[in-house]
Image: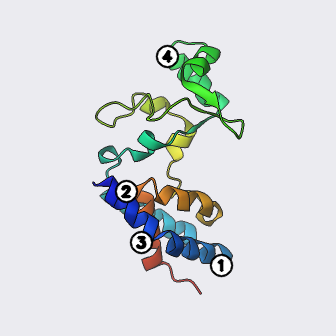
Amino acid sequence: MDLEEYFQKAKQKQKEHKSFLEKLKKRPPKDLDKKMEAIHEDVFDRVDCLSCANCCKTTGPLFTNKDIERLAHVFRLKPSQFIEKYLRIDEDNDYVLQQVPCPFLDTDNYCLVYEDRPKACREYPHTDRKKFYQINHLTIKNTLICPATYEVVEQMQKEITLK
């Protein structure tokens, strides 16, 4: 996958995607969650995250206190030591990685802490959540990072008729 080519394509579609998602938010179909589940599954049957890992290379997740405690335990560190070694506080006062790419990403795009990864990583790119239309701002942002999110929005445009 050529990420630069994908990024350019996603950038060109930003206005179109944003317009579609705004219309979707104003009048979400009654069966949207069911349709989104099917679209999400279809896209992720075709897209291999391990061939990309762009999310892990370019963005960092938020770390909850539970995430910090769990990962500190994995590394046999005190939570304060884990924070000092890997995290910083961002402008929203959230714990995030000190740097990207993620220090837990290995050379084959596998996550070294996959079973214990942060909640934000487990839920990314959020295309299978209920009431999907409530996170349009995040979805638009994620289309520029995640080829699967871009494909989800493209497929939504084909399959979901807006009134």
* Residue, disc 2: 44
First in residue order: circle 2 vs circle 1: 1
Q: Amino acid at mark 2?
A: Phe
Quarter assignment of residue 94: top right
What secondary structure is marked by label 1? loop
Which residue: 45% across, 65% down? 11
* Residue, disc 3: 155
Which residue: 50% across, 56% down? 142
User: As drawn, which residue projects farthest toward the bottom?
Assistant: 163
Res. 15 mark: none
User: As drawn, which residue projects farthest toward the right?
Assistant: 93
First in residue order: circle 3 vs circle 1: 1
What secondary structure is marked by label 4? loop
First in residue order: circle 3 vs circle 4: 4
Quarter assignment of residue 86: top right
* Residue 41 x %, y %: 40, 60
70 vs 12: above or below: above
Cα distance in 3D space between marks 2 and 3: 12 Å
Cα distance in 3D space between marks 4 and 2: 31 Å
What secondary structure is marked by label 3? helix
Cα distance in 3D space between marks 3 and 1: 18 Å
* Residue, disc 1: 27
Cα distance in 3D space between marks 2 and 1: 26 Å
First in residue order: circle 2 vs circle 3: 2
* Residue 51 x %, y %: 29, 46
- Would you say residue 156 is visible in this rendering? yes
